[in-house]
Amino acid sequence: MGNDMYSVEQVADRLGLHVRTVRGYIRSGRLRAVRIGKQYRVARADLDALTGTPDPARPDVPVAAEVSSIVQVDGIHRHGADRLGTLLLAAANTNHDPANPLRVQTLHDEERSRMKVVIIGGVAATAELLHLLHGVLDGDDSLLGKEIGDA
């Protein structure tokens, strides 16, 4: 046997478990194994599936990264928060990979004139949305401060 198959004892050593625990996993179906004679053998892929470790021998599985960002905008009125939230949601739902959607949630605290924006998604898409947010907040003073029509 090559390095791709492990005995129950080897699996127990690798996981820091008792041999009986590993056999229990096999009997319950939690860990797939092949019975050869009186012994079980566990494939590397099945062990990786149990532990949640990606198989290094499979380069076809892409590495994925997800970003979670929370942005706090102070001094923004309700109307501005609504406009900014609509802009961000529209941008998040446009021109992005449908397999990896960009998720955006907004919350406005009228009492404190504060808005929180939560963005969850891929690195590049999140960076684009944060860049858009920065550009809007840096260039549009009408979103901040007083309501439209206030003197």
Image: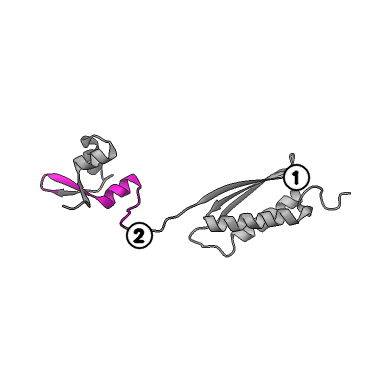
Residue 138 is situated, as x and y percent measured from the top left of the image, at 72, 54
Residue 111 is situated, as x and y percent measured from the top left of the image, at 74, 39
> In this rendering, does residue 71 appear at all?
yes
Q: In which quarter of the image is residue 110?
A: top right
Tell me what residue is drawn at x 86 percent, y 52 percent: 149
Give the labeled residue for mark 1: 75
**How far is mark 2 from mark 1, CA to CA?**
48 Å
Q: Does the magenta stretch include residue 76?
A: no
In the foreground, 65 or 109: 65
Where disc 2 sits, the SS reads loop
- Residue 94 is left or right of residue 110, and the answer is left
In the displayed image of the protein, which residue is found farthest to the bottom?
A: 95
Q: Residue 38 carries which label?
A: none
> In this rendering, does residue 83 appear at all?
no
Where disc 1 sits, the SS reads loop
- Residue 94 is left or right of residue 64, and the answer is right
Give the labeled residue for mark 2: 59
Instruction: Characterize the local packing of mark 1: few (<14), some (14-19) or many (20 or more) Cα atoms within 10 angstroms.
Output: some
- Residue 40 is left or right of residue 132, and the answer is left
The residue type indicated by label 1 comes to Gly
Q: Give the range drawn in magenta.
A: 36-57
Give the mark toward the camera: 2 or 1. Answer: 2
Residue 106 is situated, as x and y percent measured from the top left of the image, at 64, 49
Of the two numbered discs 2 and 1 on the same chain, state the one appearing first in sequence. Answer: 2
